[in-house]
Amino acid sequence: MKNIIWFKNITIKNIPEVGGKTASLGEMYSKLSRHGITIPNGFAITANAYRCFLETNGLDKKIREILKGLDSHKLKNLQERGRKIREAILAGALPADLSQEIISSYRELSQEFEKNNADVAVRSSATAEDLPGASFAGQQETYLNVSGEKGLLLAVKKCFASLYTDRAISYREDKGFGHSKVYLSVAVQKMVRSDKASSGIIFTIDPDTGFSGVVVIDSSWGLGEFVVQGEIIPDEFQIFKAALKKGYPAIISKKLGTKEKALVYGKGGKETRPAGVPLKKRKQFTLSDKEIIQLAKWAVKVEEHYKKPMDLEWAKDGQSGKLYILQARPETVQSQRDALVIEDYALKKAGELVVKGVAVGAKIAEGKANIIKSAKEIGKFREGEILVTTMTDPDWEPIMKIASAIVTDKGSRTSHAAIVSRELGIPCIVGTGDATRKIKSGEQITVDCSNGRDGFVWRGKTEWLVKRYELKGLKRPETKIMMNIGSPSEAYESSFIPSDGVGLAREEFIIASEIRIHPLALINFAKLKDKKLKKQIEALTSGFKNKKDFFVEKLSEGVAQIAAAFYPRPIIVRFSDFKTNEYASLLGGRDYEPEEENPMIGWRGASRYYDPRFKEAFGLECRAIKRAREKLGLTNIIVMVPFCRTPEEGRKVLETMAGFGLKRGEKGLKVYVMAEIPSNVILADAFLDIFDGFSIGSNDLTQLTLGIDRDNAGLAGIGNEENEAVKKSIAGLIAAAKKKKKYSGICGQAPSDYPDFADFLVEKGIESISLNPDSVLKTTLAILEKEKRLKK
């Protein structure tokens, strides 16, 4: 049996000889290079070589003796046994013939790159790793920037020893892999000089939700270990696959990371070292759009080749400017989830907010906090506690598996803590910044990941509900069931709930959370006199010379994420419907908004869009929708005009939209009007002559029909959407739309709150009902029953 195999002679069938990681490298090198995917060359030191090493040194028997009676849940026991095995392996000698083969192959690799002693990555590859259901991510060691024959041989032995790190022993015990049946191969691969550029991770599905429609790329300056370990918050890019395959540059999200430090080549004999990143460089994206698209296309080709979701590592060479794929393994968490069962965690009552960060998963857990700042202190941790730490690495896994939740100061959605918590199925919040300072050991806390992207740590116990839905065999009603989606962060998770699309996507959520600046303050940025305000805007819009582009890109990305989640199902995006007081609360907004006695019936919706005071700001919204539809390929986007008081206003809005390049009917664009004012009911035919249909806003229609301020609790007893006057108005709108064969839907709160109201809508023949995500399944079942009764 061979001790050395070059990548060109390796395929996925060689897992027993070279392990999952190296077999995948060889598979790509031998089969995907022809598609333009570049993989650095190298060779594998096989599992047979490892076995020969053990036998020559009598280590196989010794290892079995040391592991007898192991209890991996007793940390001191585990640590002591692991240390003894590693010391024994490092004390062993590589057989002379094996050493010579390794050196000879290393010289050949060095000659290929015209170097005396090529800088190489020495990567462990266990024969049971990177398999569906068992990732073994980070269980064994990798050594970067290894050069020289002596250094290479030492790194190989260190890799052999890393098969028995504490975390690797513990992981195999939990997964039921026999230690004596797992062998180690070592990949020796030419280094990519990403220390002079950037590197990171790629997932071919969203790692939090398992949504398969996107490629997610994490990227930071320098070598990739800091991204993998969660040492920094990297840049994150999301690319929509369906549009990418059609040739669109479909980057639907770009988030700037902090990237405060980078891992670079070491000095004075050290292989690597951390280095600070200048502030100017931190504020730059680490990849160009062209490079993002290239990596995404490669990731899709790799996924198609393996026919399963993949987790890849990539790097950019700062000397040549070329991109490389370094590793590819099956994604082992979200791809294994049961798509026929949905668990919905909902917080009923929150405590005092302690810290917030990036949520991993969608669950809630509570317990006693235990602050552990070093892996040397993990013996202090008890089962069921919540681990609070700066960051984790594979050495922490023995206690991570007994934690009820994890909270870290550092890290991103693809950091070690995030990856392991997903595999364990526990909630995790990363990147809080200061959890280890604000949380005290021993105090009761609740870790809440039920709100999309943001995760919250609440002080004390809280109340929450868990609803479990079985989707197997669920039929679809004739009435379309759509969803109301506010934040893009909830769209991917909500996309798994059976629906016909999105009946209401609110721009306001994106503007308030992602943009936070009044559009006119961005348009007039150069003229702003308030230095403090300019500084705040400059900080939020870092990387954008033209501040208007910031608004357009961030709004289009938010809309695109929702559209991608439900593609090709339609999503109805409502243009901004802030009231004047709400617009004034945005940064710089007070200079552009009048004070109104009653903003609810003031300058809002359609009346703003064509007004010279706001027209240019509305133009940014039109540009954002046009960008999402035409540049990013999300042609399932329909737009809706809110609070349109007269048909004349409707025509002015459509003319204004066309002036900004967003013309009704062009490239399939539909424009609906929100029917929420009595005039929309009375002049229904006239409005339908202008627009493609109605989306009924039952909240405003109720208050304006009954003359009730919906924010006045003292008037709530007078009436609601089930009032006869309101129902008669809605019935008239549905009938008018049916007569003209145009769309009618409802996106107000009523169908979510009142089951009888949903029955009424079905009876009248409404085309679609849009609901809050937590109401979709129960209302679907009720509507199926109603339709069944109507057919009798």
Image: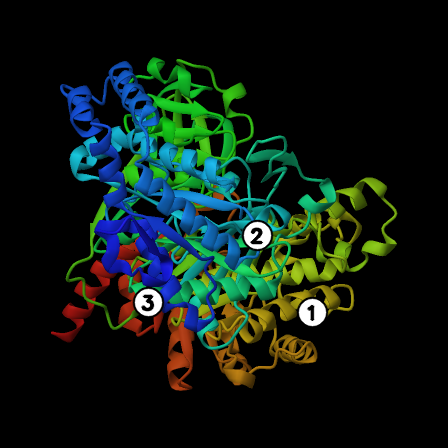
Name the amino acid type tagged 3. His
Q: CA distance from mark 2 to mark 3?
A: 33 Å
Q: CA distance from mark 1 to mark 2?
A: 57 Å
Residue 32 horizontal/vertical position (percent): 39, 68
Residue 235 horizontal/vertical position (percent): 57, 49
Above or below, 668 relative to 249: below
Secondary structure beneath disc 1?
helix
Name the amino acid type tagged 2. Lys
Q: Earlier in the sequence, mark 2 or mark 3?
A: 2
Residue drawn 21% across the image and 39% down it: 182
Residue 305 - label: 3
Provide the residue designation for mark 1: 619
- Can the viewer see residue 14 in this picture? yes
Q: Residues within 10 Å of mark 1 (few under 14, many from 20)?
A: many
Residue drawn 88% across the image and 47% down it: 529
Secondary structure beneath disc 2?
loop
Q: CA distance from mark 1 to mark 3?
A: 43 Å
Q: Is residue 284 left or right of residue 569?
A: right
Residue 457 horizontal/vertical position (percent): 45, 29
Q: Is residue 674 left or right of residue 277?
A: left
Name the amino acid type tagged 1. Gly
Please tell me which residue lies in front, 721 or 666: 666
Is label 1 in contact with label 3 (beta carbons under 8 Å)?
A: no
Secondary structure beneath disc 3?
helix
Q: Earlier in the sequence, mark 1 or mark 3?
A: 3
